[in-house]
Image (cartoon, rainbow, N blue to C red):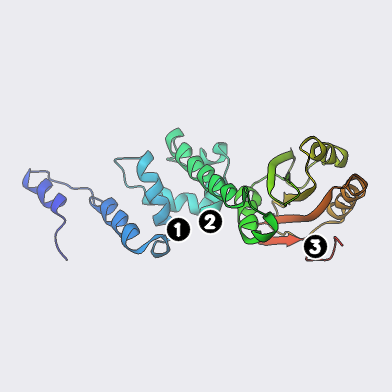
């Protein structure tokens, strides 16, 4: 293997010790440019992000520690800043970089469904919902409000609760649809447990919203539950006619 020119230069200048990771960053960046993200392990992709926040230190141990603590690349990105800070080596700069990546992914996902019929962009919709909610530690309930062409008018979080419950007020959901002149909605919430299987309260709450919305000309297209293990669609499960 050819000698790293940066290492050779450092040695010529008389440095007794050269960090073992010298040149690693350039090599990793080159692999990413030449072969793409699929050629990198999760910890390596995480290293690339950490390079920006930690310019002069080996970040591989931190990348692996984050994955060990939270379980997956997506879980690391979605982890609350307070929990990230519990990992030794995570500074405010590191947390900011991770949250920036998460925010960027959400912005891209939202752009993929904005201004176009949501029902014909179903895969993009599911991807967006999973990115936004699947790895959250608390339940969130959000509503996608659609116009007559089923294009997205607004995406709003209606409530955030505990690890297994979010208060939902069906009349408020419908009231907001009227304010936005929406003619249809898609309900979305997450199960932090990871299992997206609808619960009995989920089913009852959905029916309450349908019963209030239907006389006002507002259609509930679907209720999607997302979790680490996947997603569940009420319409696909025939829980919505």
Q: Check whether the beta carbons of the residues at disc 3 and disc 1 lie within 8 A of each other.
A: no
Q: Position of residue 207 (x, y in %)?
A: 89, 52
Q: Position of residue 67 (x, y in %)?
A: 49, 53
Mark-to-mark CA distance, 2 and 3: 30 Å
How dense is the environment of label 3, judged by Cα within 10 Å: few (below 14), some, or many (20 and up)?
Answer: some
Q: Check whether the beta carbons of the residues at disc 2 and disc 1 lie within 8 A of each other.
A: yes
| Mark 1 lies on residue | 42
Is residue 159 depicted above or below 238 in this figure?
A: above
Mark-to-mark CA distance, 3 and 1: 34 Å
Judge whether residue 48 can be spotted in this image. yes
Mark drawn on residue 205:
none
Q: Is residue 239 left or right of residue 134?
A: right
Judge whether residue 228 can be spotted in this image. no
| Mark 2 lies on residue | 72
Earlier in the chain: of badge 3 and badge 1, it is 1
Q: Nearer the viewer, residue 102 or 156?
A: 156
* Label 2 element class: loop
Earlier in the chain: of badge 2 and badge 3, it is 2
Earlier in the chain: of badge 2 and badge 1, it is 1
The residue at the point 7 percent across, 43 percent down is: 13
| Mark 3 lies on residue | 235
Q: Position of residue 19 (x, y in %)?
A: 23, 48
Give the number of the mark in front: 2 or 3.
3
The residue at the point 39 percent across, 56 percent down is: 44
Q: Nearer the viewer, residue 71 or 37?
A: 37
């Amino acid at each position: 293997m050819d000698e790293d020119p940066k290492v050779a230069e450092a040695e010529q200048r008389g440095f007794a010790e050269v960090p073992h990771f010298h040149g690693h960053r350039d090599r990793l960046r080159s692999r990413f440019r030449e072969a793409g993200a699929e050629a990198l392990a999760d910890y390596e992709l995480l290293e690339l992000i950490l390079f920006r926040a930690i310019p002069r230190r080996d970040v591989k141990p931190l990348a692996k520690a984050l994955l060990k603590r939270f379980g997956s690349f997506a879980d690391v990105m979605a982890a609350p800043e307070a929990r990230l800070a519990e990992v030794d080596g995570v500074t405010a700069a590191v947390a900011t970089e991770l949250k920036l990546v998460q925010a960027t992914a959400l912005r891209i996902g939202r752009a993929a469904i904005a201004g176009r019929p949501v029902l014909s962009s179903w895969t993009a919709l599911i991807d967006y919902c999973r990115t936004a909610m699947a790895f959250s530690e608390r339940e969130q309930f959000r509503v996608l409000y659609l116009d007559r062409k089923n294009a997205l008018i607004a995406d709003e979080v209606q409530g955030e609760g505990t690890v297994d419950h979010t208060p939902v007020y069906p009349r408020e959901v419908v009231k907001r649809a009227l304010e936005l002149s929406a003619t249809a909605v898609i309900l979305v919430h997450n199960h932090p447990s990871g299992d997206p299987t609808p619960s009995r309260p989920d089913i009852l709450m959905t029916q309450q919203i349908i019963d209030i919305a239907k006389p006002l000309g507002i259609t509930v297209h679907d209720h999607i539950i997302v979790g680490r293990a996947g997603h569940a669609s009420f319409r696909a499960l025939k829980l919505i006619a």
